[in-house]
Image (spheres, rainbow, N blue to C red):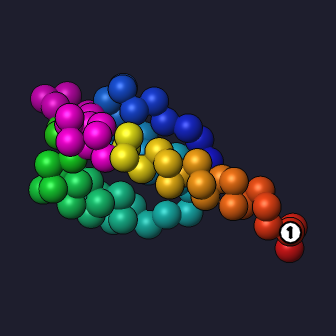
Amino acid sequence: MQLVDRAEPVGARALLDRCPGLSSSVPYDRLRDLTAAGLIVQDPSDQYRLTPSGRSLGTALDPLDAWSKRWARSRPDP
């Protein structure tokens, strides 16, 4: 998985390129959902960026992300 700089705006096509094999409708649907929820906004150049609420959600999820990485490392390889 490619890490994304959350501070930089990104276009829908660039997001789709980071998800090989994903149907093109999925990211566009999620972008609409996230925009409607007020977590991202689209700027005049069609780039998406996090709103203050979107950034705070990322911060709130950081402990869960850290836990999931610790848990994954503790699992035996399949």
Placement of 77 over or under 8, stated as above or below: below
Identify the secondary structure beneath mark 1.
loop
Q: To which quarter of the image does residue 43 belong?
A: top left
User: Can residue 46 be seen from the camera position used here?
Assistant: no
Which amino acid does the dot numbered 1 rest on? Pro
Residue 40 falls left or right of residue 66: left
Which of 51 and 45 lies nearest the eye of the viewer? Answer: 51
Residue hosting label 1: 76
- Residue 33 in picture, x, y percent from top left: 21, 60
Which of 36 and 57 lies nearest the eye of the viewer? Answer: 57
Placement of 52 over or under 29, stated as above or below: above
Residue 37 falls left or right of residue 62: left
Q: Which residues are magenta?
A: 43-57
Residue 1 falls left or right of residue 23: right
Q: Give me the residue at 42% from left, 50% from top.
A: 61
Question: What is the quadrant of the C terminus in the image?
Answer: bottom right
Q: To which quarter of the image does residue 20 belong?
A: bottom right
Q: Give me the residue at 28% from left, 40% from top.
A: 56
Residue 2 falls left or right of residue 61: right
- Residue 9 in picture, x, y percent from top left: 32, 29
Extreme residue toward the bottom, this view? 78
- Residue 58 in picture, x, y percent from top left: 37, 43
Q: Give me the residue at 20% from left, 36% from top.
A: 51
User: Can residue 44 be seen from the camera position used here?
Assistant: yes
Q: Give me the residue at 27% from left, 63% from top.
A: 29
Callout count = 1
